[in-house]
Amino acid sequence: MTAPAGDEARRPLVLVPRGGAWGDRVAEAARARGLDPVVVPLIVDAPPEDPAALDAALDRLAAAAGRHGAAPTDTPAPDGRSPGTSGARPAAAARPDGRGADAPWLVVTSATAVRAVAGRMAGLPAGVHVACVGEATARVARNTGWPVDLVPEDESGAGLVAEFPVTSGHVLFPRSEIAAATVVDGLRAAGIDVEDVVAYRTVGTGDEPVHLDRAPDVVLVTSGSVASQVARRMTPLDPHTRIACIGPATAEAAREAGLPVHVIGRSRSAEALLDAVVETLPTEAPEAPRSGRSS
């Protein structure tokens, strides 16, 4: 793979680890910040091995919403972003549309989970609360037409668990096949009955080492899956390459994979991660291009 030449070659080279619309959006955001992105897909999403299990779980969510008897609403509810809780876990508030403490919940911790669920049902059943791990996931959920009831101040699985209200309703957590147990274990420890189901798989794009004509100044690590692929296909890293992680949980996964961590984004969005990268990079990249191994 050839790195860009000319003026762009003197900009900090940033490796974007996923392709598709997400990769295009992040690359454009990187260029807007004076960076030179190269999109090298290290992972792709794949359907679950047992799609029937996801369909059955979504049917149970719809049935729970029907038993709750909430009236449908034409307008998505405003974002019910909750403040952090330092004391007792709050009870789920009653809503004008009839949703209360026994309403069912859908918990999503990635944009991919939102798309996986939306792709397998005609619409979110009326009466379902939605909890999103962060604003990036919430943005995709709202764009899908879902109301978003909870986005934790601490945009992490642990933060979501800490702010999740007491509920006796059905809670569905559609997740990646390799998702950490933080959300499920945390909610169950709080006495909340959670059904978790695999909604998608994250798989690597190959086994061969990835070579660029010029080693990247920064590799964006946006999940534990990306961290694993970077460690497997890109190490040893060029001494000048920095690892930038989208959040503390991803940073921990990167360290467990044997990677150094130089940058951690302030929130779980690629844009916030790029901002953190810009703050830590020198204003000019080294003049002489380097050769190195990366992907």
Image (cartoon, rainbow, N blue to C red):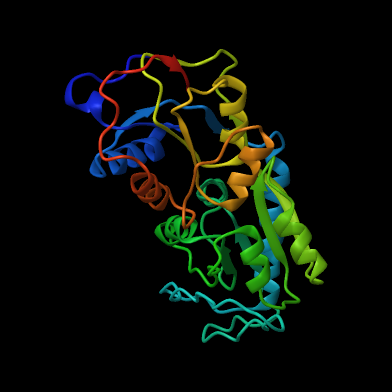
How many numbered marks does the figure carry?
Answer: 0
Q: Determine whether 225 is above or below 292 in the image.
A: below
Residue drawn at x 40%, y 58% is: 143
Q: Position of residue 78 (x, y in %)?
A: 43, 76
The quadrant in which the N terminus is found is top left
Residue drawn at x 62%, y 23% is: 232
Q: Determine whether 64 is above or below 52 in the image.
A: below
Q: Determine whether 171 is above or below 21 in the image.
A: below
Residue drawn at x 60%, y 27% is: 231
Residue 200 appears anywhere in the view: no
Q: Position of residue 152 (x, y in %)?
A: 55, 68
Q: Position of residue 230 (x, y in %)?
A: 56, 28
Residue 170 or residue 190, whichever sits in front: 190
Q: Position of residue 203 (x, y in %)?
A: 61, 29
Residue drawn at x 53%, y 68% is: 151
Q: Determine whether 109 is above or below 208 in the image.
A: below
**For residue 142, side relative to residue 186 (left or right):** left
- The picture quadrant where one finds residue 109 is bottom right
- The picture quadrant where one finds residue 140 is bottom left
Residue 30 appears anywhere in the view: yes
